[in-house]
Amino acid sequence: MKIDRENLQRKVAELKKAGYTYLVKITAVDYSTNVQAVYILRNIPKSEDVTIEIDLGNDDLWLPTLIDHYRAADWYEREMSEMFGIEIRGRVARRLLLEKWDGVDPPLRKNFQWNAPYKST
Amino acid sequence: MPITRINIGPVHPSTHGVLRLVVDIDGDTVKNVEPHIGMLHRGVEKLVETRMYMQSPPYMEKLDYISPLSYDEAYVAAVEAALGVEVKERAQYVRLIQLELQRIASHLFFIGTLCNDLGQMFTTFMWAFEDRDKVLYLLQEATGSRMFYVNMRLGGVVRDLPPDFAEHALNFLDYLDKRLKEYESFIEKNPVFMERMKGVGVLSRADAIDLGVTGHVLRASGISYDVRKDKPYYVYEKLNFNVKTQQGGDNFARYKLRMEEIRESARLIRRALNTIPEGDALGMPIRLIGPSAKNKISMVSRELPRGEALMYLVADPQRPYRLSIRSPCFINLAALGHLTSDVRLADLFAIMGSLDLVVACVDR
Amino acid sequence: MIGNLLSYFFLAEWLSSSNPLLYLLGLVVYAIAVAIVISVFAYCFGWIERKIIAKVQHRHGPTYVGKYGILQNLADLVKLLAKQQTVPDTADKPVLYLSIMLVLAISTFIIFLLPLSPTLQASNLGFGLLAIFVIIAFFPMLIFLTGFSSGNKFADISAQRSVLIMIAYEIPMMIVVAAAALLSRGYNIQSLITMQSSNYFVVLMPIGFVVFFIVMLAELERPPFDLKEADSELIAGWLTDISAPFYAFALFIDYTRMFMGSLLIAILFFGGWYGPLLPPEVWLLIKAVIISLFIVVIRATTMRMRIDRILRTGWWYLVPLSLINLLLVYILFVG
């Protein structure tokens, strides 16, 4: 299902009440003109998954945090914000998780120059 | 006593790879663990975007060098789902047999390294490796390679099982049954082992779900979720796969669960070998073009030895547009901080050993 | 064997001579003989241990250098000696080197003080047993010094652990020794062994033997009590920053201490040199080797205990058991 980022926390709270208590994955896809965040939640007893897609546009990349609902969101959010440059609001900003490069384009965005020579920072 | 901060890794006897932990200890009690990952980050997700579809399986295998075939299969299954390729019936059996053999090999590795982390002088480790080697010989017979198999093709496998494979595999499984009993009597009768495992690193049901742990960590906490049962693929349903669970949620439950999973895998392989249909199992020759539709999303879950992997593949005609891998080790490592609050320093490594991390799989 | 040969010619005479010069000469020769025996034991046992552990683990162990790999340890020694010594800047080097050397000196000295046969001994002190255990109490102190002075946090933790274990395990050890002294009516080692000519002390006080064996394992840092150099958590504990020649030294210390512990157990509980046919020194060595083999097999199979459990075992089981042992010995054989 597709929702707005403003509704994310409310929707997730509803889903969690409906039994979707397990967070499978938070990820994102850069469709060049639009970065889409993907949340996959799971209802374990019924073994059903639900996918939440949020279109973020291309400029104003931010998302509310889910860390209050799922502790599993912690590392996924950190990874996503590092790899896509998405700002996660409402949580303590932690150091980058996977790579320590600052000032470089987020590596999983499509405009990242993957074959450019590496510049030491 | 003031809090001491010690740095463990990236090179350390029991971090199983280049994992760095910054541990705050108060005397001998662990107060805070901060894992620093990323030292093995190869950017596989980005790399896949720059390759044709069937050029990527070798990269996938390097994600988890303990159970390479499983990741290989998960990726190929995601591509198959995107392309809409049906897997041939015999190929389903062949894949299942190889995946379960890989699972046995991986679990034996786990038992060996766990005992090593508990401070044993490599004895169980060497025994487990000896048996794991026998599995590797079987896989070598089936695929032609010992470590990185790359045996999956769209719709089937590269090599069908050789004619006398069934006999060799059944012989091995009989031998394995005896060996498992030997392991259990050797390890579980050791009071030090039981003392170090029972009641250490307890993860409750609610915490397990909240922290999103997966695989044996989840099932050891009493939650019966296994992709092989809940979203069955291949012929798992036909072969009556049973999910194993343990209630304890501690280190011992995780170890015991793995022992039972080895037995269950052995049972599955036996049944599969007995009921495998005749026919063709070979997949398509390598095809460099993908699906015709643009941005076709395929989401495939697979139960790897270490837990559930989810491949979120956005497919383009030529090459993957985006592949997002949900790595089981990544989320299990994220739970380490919760599991190790206020444990003894020695237990930190026992718990880490029981999570069975592969750092390559964490970092991707 | 060298000691054995010497004893029948002149060494025993010299050592019991009333002429101080001759006695001194005897001491020097005896010290050299003991050093040779220790070196031979350490070398052979290094190889035997590798072979035994390899057998337990379904491996072959060293095979390449020399027949059955017997020269492998020599090759390793040469390699270690040829390596560069690296010591961190934070280390207190004189203390570090001195304390390690003292560990070796003390374990050698204890073996030197132990009688190898009725006639072959450095001195026949009336309080010999007490003296030995007083010297043994220096080990944890020196290990603490080594760990503390190497300026490494892992070594530091190891040093703290060594003190904790010392406090918990020296007490039951001394109580068991007191029970043995009670049985032999004194602290003289000669009379302690002579008392065992009919009955080994292991028969008279089995509880004491169990307690002493466990304590000795902890004292020798052998699994399951090898917490001071726990490799899966503390890398190498107090030896973390010891490299190259000094690491060879540390390995040598390891076997010297094992030899010392086995000799002590053999003397205290297995009747020292008593045995048929063979000369007494040989019997003592055979007993020590068998005990060492047992320690090695334990090393190959068990896991490491946790520090809090070790301390609990010490205080809740070993101390009461050793007291019960003392009481039983008093009631049954003395009172």
Image (cartoon, coloured by chain):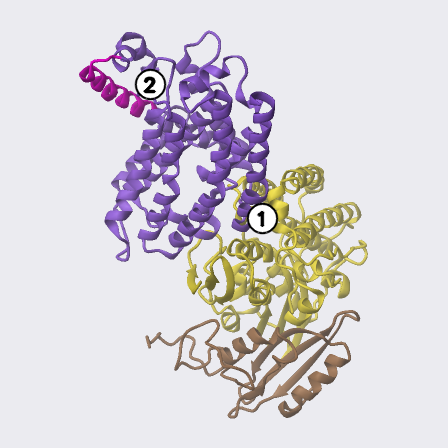
Chain colours: A brown, B yellow, C purple
Instruction: Sort mark 2 into few (<14), some (14-19) or many (20+) by Cα contacts within 10 Å.
Output: many
- Same chain, marks 2 and 1? no
Residue position for label 2: C121
Closer to the camera, B247 or C179? Answer: C179
**Residue B240 image point, x, y percent:** 81, 54
Magenta stretch, main secondary structure class? helix
Magenta stretch, residue numbers = C17-37
The x and y percentages for residue B312 are: 63, 73
Examine the rendered structure and indicate whether residue B234 appears above or below residue C208. below
Tell me the amino acid under the disc marked 2.
Answer: Gln
The structure residue drawn at horizontal position 69% and vertical position 76%, both measured from the top left corner, is A41
Which mark's residue is nearer the viewer, 2 or 1? Answer: 2
Between A104 and A96, the one lying in front of the other is A96
The residue at which mark 1 appears reads as: B109
Q: Quadrant of the N terminus of chain B?
A: bottom left
**Secondary structure of the residue carrying numbered label 1:** helix
- Is residue B142 visible from the viewing direction of this image? no
Q: Residue at x 46, y 80 (%)?
A: A106
* Left or right, residue C143 beside residue A14: left
Q: Classify mark 1: residues with Cα within 10 Å, few (<14), some (14-19) or many (20+).
A: many
